[in-house]
Amino acid sequence: MRAEKRNVLTLAACQALFQTASVLIMTVGGLAGQMLAADKSLATLPIASMSVGTALVTIPASLIMQRAGRRVGFMIGTLLGALGGGLSVVALLIGSFWLFNLGNLLVGAYQGFSQFYRFAAAEVASPEFKSRAISFVLAGGVVAAIAGPHLGNHTRDLLGSGTTFAGSYVTVVVLSLAAMALLGRLQVPPAALTTDTSGARPLAEIVRQPAFVVALTGASVGYGVMILAMTATPLAMVAHHHGVGDAAFVIQWHVLGMFVPSFFTGTLIARFGVLPVMFTGAVLLLGHVTIALSGVALLNFVSALMLLGVGWNFLFIGGTTLLTETYRMSEKGKLQGLNDFLIVGVVVIASFASGGLLQRFGWQGVNMAALPFLLGIAALIAGFALRRRMQPSLGSPG
């Protein structure tokens, strides 16, 4: 039990460092892109590039860790993060928009490895501790909520005048190297010991499971809607005459909404079941849209973005927990990789769409675009919950 908790704590700390870098980029990346880009509709392209980097390495990262182990894979990720942060600093110093996108793409590759922290937590935890272990690791993002926006805002001129935002990306390098140092303490069972002896089923058979469809769709919609709104928020706030400090304040409260619930989401799932928690997440995201459409005052942005964070948390942790019910250990590498690749694919689309929607239709258009997806996932979860009550085997991997 002591080793179990030590590993989960290490993963949570690494999650905190990675997520701080990610939130920092979410706070300043769009503003830096707007500063560098000739076409201002491409302002969110650096954030989209980060998502592309995640998509490109998600499946290779899963396969590398299946073969070489979690610790090796995670350390490769931190190295990519440090390299990406360094390239971004150079790009900002020389004013290269496209090199800046490449740097953000490499930071996204870091994310492609780091997003498996939650699965590693599930693997080192006992069955009764699994959902809480996933939650505790994601709770490392609470540190990111406090540190990320502040670091992004207060280190942007760290290297002196005329180098705006370069200091923020120096911080990304430092955070990545700190995570690499921590990973030396991680003790995860070798890859060979985390697979069972039963035969792995064909991928097509696994993904046809209703539980897999709900898990993937719930996490994808939750993440896609969250990125769609979060990416646009700093630009929308500046456009509505709020300062960069105000935008950092709103992002901070949004990220607190994302991760503070992680301290009890696992307990809620254990008590009430995964599907009620996921459905509640969809309802909270609908609440975000309602508040966002009602006005552009600072209070509207803060309250809407907090609901956006909590709704994401319930859908993402719920989807991850439900996913672990759909595969055997011999199938985990390919299914986890496919799941996260598809989620990141949705995130990439949302990241690209965010800037264009904001430029053409404004903040209200960004949020209206989310409505049909949220109504759809709420209906899907409710329908599956009814079917599962009548046929409990729908969630079993066989």
Image (spheres, rainbow, N blue to C red):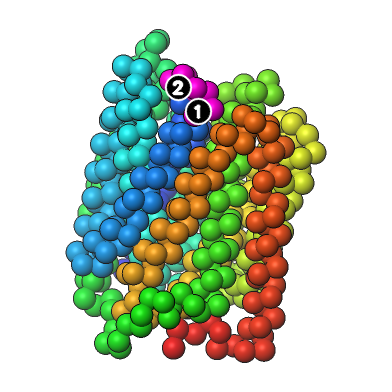
Using the image, determine if residue 39 lies above or below residue 20: above
Residue depicted at x 69% and y 75%: 383
Task: Confirm or deny contact between disc 1 and disc 2 (CB under 8 A).
Answer: yes
Q: Is residue 320 left or right of residue 230?
A: left
The residue identified by callout 1 is 43
Furthest-right residue in this view: 294
Residue depicted at x 34% and y 69%: 334
Q: Is residue 122 left or right of residue 185?
A: right
Residue nearest the observer in this picture, 190 or 349: 349
Residue depicted at x 28% and y 46%: 78
Q: Secondary structure at mark 2?
A: loop
Using the image, determine if residue 172 lies above or below residue 312: above
Q: In the picture, which quadrant includes the N terminus?
A: bottom left
Amino acid identity at mark 1: Ala
Q: Is residue 343 left or right of residue 53?
A: right
Q: Secondary structure at mark 1?
A: loop
The answer to which quarter of the image holds residue 357 is top right
Residue 110 screen position, x and y as percent: 33, 46
How far apart are the two marked residues, 1 and 2, measured between alpha carbons?
Answer: 6 Å
Q: Main secondary structure of the magenta part?
A: helix
Residue 148 screen position, x and y as percent: 47, 36
Q: Mark 1 or mark 2: which comes first in sequence? A: 2
Label 2: few (<14), some or many (≥20) within 10 Å? some
Q: Is residue 2 visible?
A: no
Using the image, determine if residue 36 lies above or below residue 135: above
Q: Is residue 102 visible?
A: yes
Which stretch appears magenta? 34-43
Furthest-top residue in this view: 161
Which label was assigned to residue 37?
2
The answer to which quarter of the image holds residue 118 is bottom left
Q: Is residue 142 magenta?
A: no
